Amino acid sequence: MMKLAESDGRQTGRSMKYQSINQFLQLGPRRLVDGPVGIVIVEDWVEIDSTLRHHLRLGFQNLIVIGPEQLPLEKDLRDRVHHIWRDPVVPGGANALINPLLPAFEGRWVYYCFNAEYLFFPFCETRSIGEVTRFVTEEKRDSVLTYVIDLYADDLSKYPDGVSLESAHLDRAGYYALGRWRDGQGIERQLDMHGGLRWRFEEHVPEDRRRIDRIGLFRAKKGLEMRPDHTFNDEEYNTYSCPWHHNLTAAVCSFRAAKALKTNPGSSQQIPSFLWFNSVRFEWHSEQLLDLGLMEPGQWF
């Protein structure tokens, strides 16, 4: 298993708490250092610590946590993150939280995820998030397509919320893509991706939440806005590659679907196990995801 608890000991600057996004916009940007910005949206209390440590290990020196005022963070984590308070029961999707922040990050690469989600990109065990964003910039791309790969515990009697780092599994097959259409026209170089738990248990998942494609890593610019479906108002951002060759893609390995299916009363009792014949243990290594075709390096070697 990947060492999620590793820390390189570097400080990202003075630890700060902000009572709102507006207060962060007034005080926070000047406290950021050069480099990509990571945003973790906290929905519940599950695996907050491991999520933050994983992304710090990837090299995010600017890590923003949007979550309740009282977060259970160890001191070393409190010293390394910017914490924006948010009441988790207040409605609003990721776009409602991300869009107000984007003007402050103009020109920077931005990544976002939820707690119990873990970013993997090709060769991330030896290369940093700064290196991958520099490479993508050199390819004249402003976004990286990330596939949300569902993780799940093997034994739901032992892990009733579907979450276990030690026994995490994923689907090795069952993924497919459909052409994306809007107003009766096919959209070039855009696909709707499906698979994982959202596909196998689609009767419990609203239709507008079944896709597993997400533009999880992108460069902020003036006028850029995220839509509720995790796409952007600039259609080029939503493409999987440029017209002339394949580009690097990444994966967000996520327990989010497993949590939802096992905590929702309408589906929990109907799912005794997430395992099927295409389940394999997750090795917490980018090589496995590359071998399964769940992300690709493009021209990056």
Image (cartoon, rainbow, N blue to C red):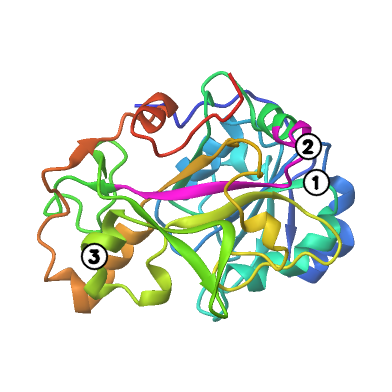
Q: What's the amino acid at mark 2?
A: Gly
Residue for point 73% across, 41% down: 36
Magenta residues, start to end: 136-151
Residue 200, horizontal then vertical, whole percent: 22, 60
**Residue 186 located left or right of residue 27:** left
Q: Which x, y percent locates residue 109?
A: 74, 45
Which is more foreground, mark 1 or mark 2?
1
Q: Which residue is mark 2?
A: 35
Sequence-wise, the earlier of marks 1 and 2 is 2
Real-space CA distance between mark 2 and mark 3, rounded to the nearest whole angstrom: 37 Å
In magenta stretch: residue 87: no
Q: Nearer the viewer, residue 53 or 194?
A: 194
What residue did someone put label 1 on? Answer: 108
> Measured from the top left, where is residue 162 in percent x and y?
25, 54
Mark 1 or 3, nearer chain start: 1
Look at the image and tell me whether residue 113 can be seen.
no
Q: Amino acid at mark 1?
A: Arg
Q: Quadrant of residue 177?
A: bottom left
State which quarter of the image contains the C terminus: top right
Q: Which comes sooner in the sequence, label 2 or label 3?
A: 2
Quarter of the figure with residue 263 = bottom left
